[in-house]
Amino acid sequence: MKFSVFTVMVPELTPKDILITLKEQGYDGVEWRCKETSGELRQQPVSFWGNNLCTISPNSTEAQLAELRSQIEQFNIETVSVNPYLDCSNLDDTENVLKIASQLGASMIRVGVPRYDRSVNYQDLFKQARNYLHEVEEMCKQYKIKGLVETHHVTIAPSASLAHRLVDQLDPKYIGVLFDPGNMIFEGYENHKMGLELLGPYLAHVHMKNASWKTKGQREDGSAIWEPAWDLVENGVVNWKQVLSDLKSVGYDGYIGMEDFSGVFTNEEALRHNISFIKHLLDD
């Protein structure tokens, strides 16, 4: 297996900083967060999903992307993917990200999946997503880049089985699934090995993070309110030793992409801690 980092977890580092750090700490690849940062956000403290300095803009110029690619090649770090926050009703934005990924030499991008908030029927959202993915498949063929559906809470693909339902009529060479067990603590848990077996050739990438269930107040009847919260990778609900064993059992030998939203360590410490943890599990 190889190891990458999704730059959403290192908001204090610049793109050049992360490349230097990844090289120093023995990582193989990087996944670029792709989102516009408004002027208002830039005035706020650095954060994972707000003023994140390790983010590339979807409006980056060719010169800016060429400079970043030169730095990527200088440090011999592979661009695994470009991960935007796409709306599956906008194919133009999706193609723009494919162009960025192509210029950076990425092999994958994260594509759009509808949110589920009880306001629109699942069947309608599913139809919309399938129509979108059929169009995206054709674009991915053109750019020779794979589009990824991520297992993510508060979407119509929180589990392996629901992600599989979205992609099972598409070519796994161009459309795959990003398997994220940490997200599945919030919503969508299934036996991981069963989910991986179901995904089969659609299993394209894996994210590694963890979360724990914690009490947060009480309801009117006095019962406890439980909510998941991000935690250190070794402390949460996901048994990563078992997940890695399950991945090996289905023949997965691709990237494990690190995400750490626990906030326990500085960005560089978190990178060091996470790669040390996974290497220890693989050697155990």
Image (cartoon, rainbow, N blue to C red):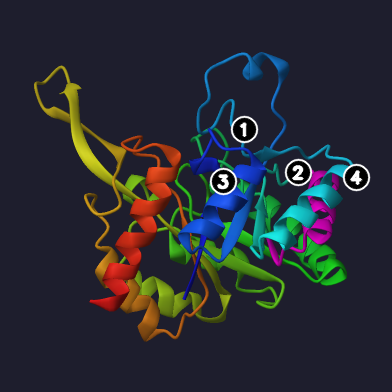
Residues shaded magenta? 89-108
- 101 within the magenta span: yes
Q: Earlier in the sequence, mark 1 or mark 3?
A: 3
**Amino acid type at image mark 1:** Leu
| Residue 123 within the magenta-colored segment of the rendering | no
* Residue 53, visible in the rendered structure: yes
The earlier-in-sequence mark between 4 and 1 is 1
Q: Give residue 63's mark.
A: 4
Residue at horizontal 51%, vertical 40%?
10
Determine whether, in the image, residue 278 is placed left or right of residue 258.
left
| C-alpha span from label 2 to label 1 | 28 Å
In three-dimensional space, the C-alpha distance between marks 4 and 3, rounded to whole angstroms, equals: 21 Å
Percent across and percent down for residue 155 are 52, 46
Which residue corresponds to mark 2? 89
Q: Which residue is mark 1?
A: 53
Residue 282 lies, in percent from the top left, at 31, 75
CA separation in Å, label 2 and label 4: 29 Å
Name which of mark 2 and mark 4 comes first in the sequence.
Answer: 4
Residue where numbered disc 3 is placed: 7
Amino acid on which the number 3 mark rests in the picture: Thr
Query: In front of the other: label 2 or label 4?
Result: 4
Going from N to C along the chain, the mark reached first, 3 or 2, is 3
Give the alpha-carbon distance from disc 3 to disc 2, as whole Å.
25 Å
Prevailing secondary structure class for the magenta stretch in the rendered image: helix
